[in-house]
Image (cartoon, rainbow, N blue to C red):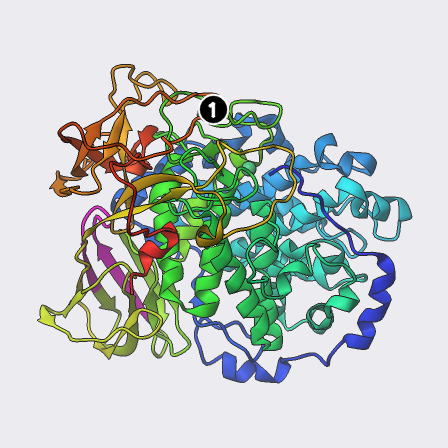
């Protein structure tokens, strides 16, 4: 992420805070919350729908484990070898002060370390890998042992009583460093949940409950771990800070458009009135208001977050399940980019919204983003990555994302400059895996995202249970769960029914179960479970051809980091270029252009100039066995054949675009084979079409819910 212009609140405003502070909220709630096994001892009265399980409760299996192992053996376990900055990140011998706290002048490893350590700890616990956990511990311990009441958050070598240090982290781009402390502390919070190391919790408490209004002086990134620290400790000083913070109204906050204010209210529904935003900034600034909702009970804060996310998806959702983010969001486009930081950020933010709202649609979005955009961020060995991916990539370094000092954002490289994406890519998989299952307040479990895994947790009257999810989902449509409680016990099991699935079938011990899904798209089975009980799920998949208009003006990244007005597709004055895309369940399909000697070398003989036959697509499904070891191969286990007509199409690679008009059907269609988008490095996934779409099904985000 390039610095989006951090705005720091003027110090004078903090004088007002005391006037708005409410009495501490919740200490006497503790006994009620404690009844739920995974509830924190001190929770505000407004509760989330689901409770996160500690990292390690869900362990990936099957193809998902292979991918996690690739992450471990590629980037995640070896970041120190990728770039010196990762060795420097939060290291005792790398302490930036003064103007070097500015992002371009030395502070950036604090962001990089924050992202990486977060992924490192969570992946370590997910895989039960002692070496990774030890590595995470070593890095966190430096911060944990040094954090002190005079430090500035986790910048322990600075002194909050030194005007010079305060100036350095609150003025200009120096404030970047206190944004980055929030990324680090989210990692610490996850690491504490996995390790239960009391020193980590003490450090969180020290940093966030001490003198001064540092949570506020920073940015919302610090809210997560501050909130977590309170729920574990009940620290009253911390409670007062959170209460004061969420009680501030816009007037007291002082400015519109900054980190704290803009997203606490609903977006203006009038097209062309709201500005877009840098997507990292958007995700980090909208999502935390759900904590404001939990803390205050003010539903408007949750509604605002959800409305902003819905707007992002309506304007910018790509078929691959992530918004356009190059680096600001804008209309869906075949050659628009999505920054790898935003693939990670999107999965993280949807996991948070899933926990708070309990809405199964958030699980749909996590799956779609992870299964499509996730693998496109990295090479199959998890050792090179792109800064930007785009739905169509036919030639190397395309589109020309001349971003930053290293101008090949669309190529797979060991690292890109800035190094944000190199760090953030470590978060995507572990955040998904650790949120595939959650706990419920009635001491049951909920399957929130699917894939092969094993969950181990306490249920009912604290009875240990293991549930094995045997599946090749999303490459197959069946999931077999084997339930093994330590002793016969009753607890509710909630199962998410994907929004795209018309008729799920469900069997318990082979017997069909007629169960209605609730308004959040979950089916709930309450019964007494004994070891060996099975739950079989089938989500029949129908191929979906989506059509719409690419209204991006060319490749679009302007690199100028300025805002433009937002238009949802139906109100966008741009006529747009017609396209079609094909999905099968949560998977987007693409015409692969084989990569040959590396992920930046396409097969020159590959044929990709086709218009999708939207009048007569004739989508057929082909299945092959899953490979022995999973690495997103071109020889994919699932393929679709479709009708497409050869066309003349010679994009200008400096500014590629889809053809502006549909092609007349003057040649017979041919059968072409599409494979999952995630298996491709070069591809066409937003196709030119043979006729102007009549029935527009954009934006892609709606594919998940067809009712
Ligand atoms: Zn990035």
Highlighted magenta segment, given as a residue range: 463-482
Looking at the rendered structure, the secondary structure element under dot 1 is: loop
Tell me where residue 520 appears, x and y as whole percent.
35, 71
Q: Dividing the image into 4 quarters, which one contains the C terminus?
A: bottom left
- Membership of 467 in magenta stretch: yes
- Membership of 345 in magenta stretch: no
* On screen, residue 290 above or below 460: above
Packing grade of label 1 (10 A; few <14, some 14-19, many >=20) is some
Q: Quadrant of residue 634?
A: top left
Q: Quadrant of residue 251?
A: bottom right
Q: Dividing the image into 4 quarters, which one contains the N terminus?
A: top right
The reply to whether residue 133 is in sight is no
* On screen, residue 535 above or below 452: below
Tell me where residue 506 appears, x and y as whole percent.
16, 67
Q: Nearer the viewer, residue 475 or 361?
A: 361
At 84% from the left and 70% from the top, the residue drawn is 16
Name the residue tied to disc 1.
413
At 32% from the left and 61% from the top, the residue drawn is 705
Q: Nearer the viewer, residue 211 or 145?
A: 211
Q: Nearer the viewer, residue 19 or 682?
A: 682
Tell me where residue 411 appears, x and y as whole percent.
45, 24
Left or right of residue 611, residue 651 in this image = right
Main secondary structure type of the part rendered in magenta: strand
At 48% from the left and 50% from the top, the residue drawn is 315
């Amino acid at each position: 992420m390039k610095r989006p212009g951090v705005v720091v609140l003027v110090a004078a405003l903090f004088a007002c805070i005391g006037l708005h502070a409410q009495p501490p909220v919740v200490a006497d709630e503790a006994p009620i919350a404690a009844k739920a096994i995974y509830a924190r001892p001190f929770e505000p009265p407004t509760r989330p729908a689901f409770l996160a399980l500690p990292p390690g409760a869900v362990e990936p299996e099957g193809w998902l484990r292979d991918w996690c192992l690739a992450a471990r053996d590629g980037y995640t376990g070896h970041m120190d070898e990728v770039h010196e900055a990762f060795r420097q990140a939060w290291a005792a011998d790398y302490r930036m002060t003064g103007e070097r706290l500015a992002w371009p002048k030395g502070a950036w490893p604090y962001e990089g370390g924050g992202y990486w350590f977060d992924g490192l700890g969570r992946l370590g616990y997910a895989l039960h890998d002692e070496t990774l956990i030890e590595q995470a511990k070593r890095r966190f311990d430096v911060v944990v042992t040094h954090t002190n009441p005079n430090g500035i958050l986790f910048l322990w070598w600075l002194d909050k009583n030194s005007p010079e240090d305060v100036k350095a982290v609150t003025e200009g781009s120096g404030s970047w460093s206190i944004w980055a402390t929030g990324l680090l502390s989210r990692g610490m919070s996850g690491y504490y949940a996995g390790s239960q190391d009391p020193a980590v919790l003490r450090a969180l408490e020290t940093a966030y409950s001490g003198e001064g209004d540092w949570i506020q002086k920073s940015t919302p990134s610090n809210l997560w771990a501050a909130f977590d620290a309170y729920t574990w400790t009940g620290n009253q000083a911390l409670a007062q800070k959170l209460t004061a913070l969420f009680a501030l109204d816009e007037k007291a906050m002082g400015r519109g458009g900054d980190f704290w204010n803009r997203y606490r209210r609903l977006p203006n529904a009038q097209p062309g009135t709201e500005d877009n935003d840098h997507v990292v900034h958007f995700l980090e600034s909208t999502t935390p208001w759900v904590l404001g909702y939990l803390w205050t009970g003010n539903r408007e804060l949750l509604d605002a977050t959800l409305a902003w996310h819905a707007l992002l998806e309506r304007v910018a959702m790509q078929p691959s399940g992530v918004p356009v983010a190059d680096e600001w969001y804008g209309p869906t486009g075949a050659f628009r980019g999505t920054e790898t930081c935003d693939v990670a950020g999107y999965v993280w933010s949807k996991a948070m919204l899933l926990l708070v709202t309990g809405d199964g649609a958030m699980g749909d979005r996590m799956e779609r983003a992870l299964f499509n955009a996730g693998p496109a961020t990295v090479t199959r060995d998890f050792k090179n990555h792109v800064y930007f991916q785009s739905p169509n990539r036919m030639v190397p370094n395309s589109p020309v994302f001349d971003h930053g000092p290293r101008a090949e954002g669309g190529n797979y490289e060991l690292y890109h400059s800035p190094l944000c994406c190199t760090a953030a890519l470590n978060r995507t998989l572990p955040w998904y895996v650790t949120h595939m299952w959650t706990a419920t307040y009635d001491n049951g479990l909920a399957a929130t995202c699917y894939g092969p895994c094993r969950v181990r947790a306490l249920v009912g009257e604290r009875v240990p249970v293991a549930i094995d999810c045997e599946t090749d989902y999303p490459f197959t449509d069946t999931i077999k769960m084997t339930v093994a409680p330590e002793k016969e016990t009753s607890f509710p099991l909630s199962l998410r029914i994907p929004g795209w699935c018309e008729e799920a079938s469900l069997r318990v011990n082979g017997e069909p179960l007629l169960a209605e899904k609730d308004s959040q798209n979950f089916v709930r089975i309450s019964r007494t479970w004994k070891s060996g009980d099975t739950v079989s799920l089938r989500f029949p998949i129908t191929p979906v051809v989506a059509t719409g208009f690419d209204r991006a003006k060319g490749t679009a990244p302007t690199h100028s980091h300025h805002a433009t007005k937002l238009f949802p597709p139906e109100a966008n004055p741009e006529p747009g270029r017609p396209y079609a895309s094909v999905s099968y369940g949560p998977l987007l399909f693409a015409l692969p252009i084989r990569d040959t000697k590396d992920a930046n070398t396409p097969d020159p003989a590959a044929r990709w100039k086709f218009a999708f036959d939207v009048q007569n697509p004739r989508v057929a499904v082909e299945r092959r066995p899953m490979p022995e070891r999973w690495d997103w191969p071109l020889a994919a286990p699932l393929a679709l054949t479709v009708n497409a007509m050869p066309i003349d199409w010679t994009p200008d690679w400096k500014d590629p675009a889809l053809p502006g008009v549909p092609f007349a059907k003057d040649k017979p269609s041919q059968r072409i084979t599409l494979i999952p988008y995630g298996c491709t490095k070069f591809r066409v996934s937003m196709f030119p079409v043979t006729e102007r779409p009549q029935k527009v099904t954009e934006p892609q985000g709606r594919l998940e819910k067809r009712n």
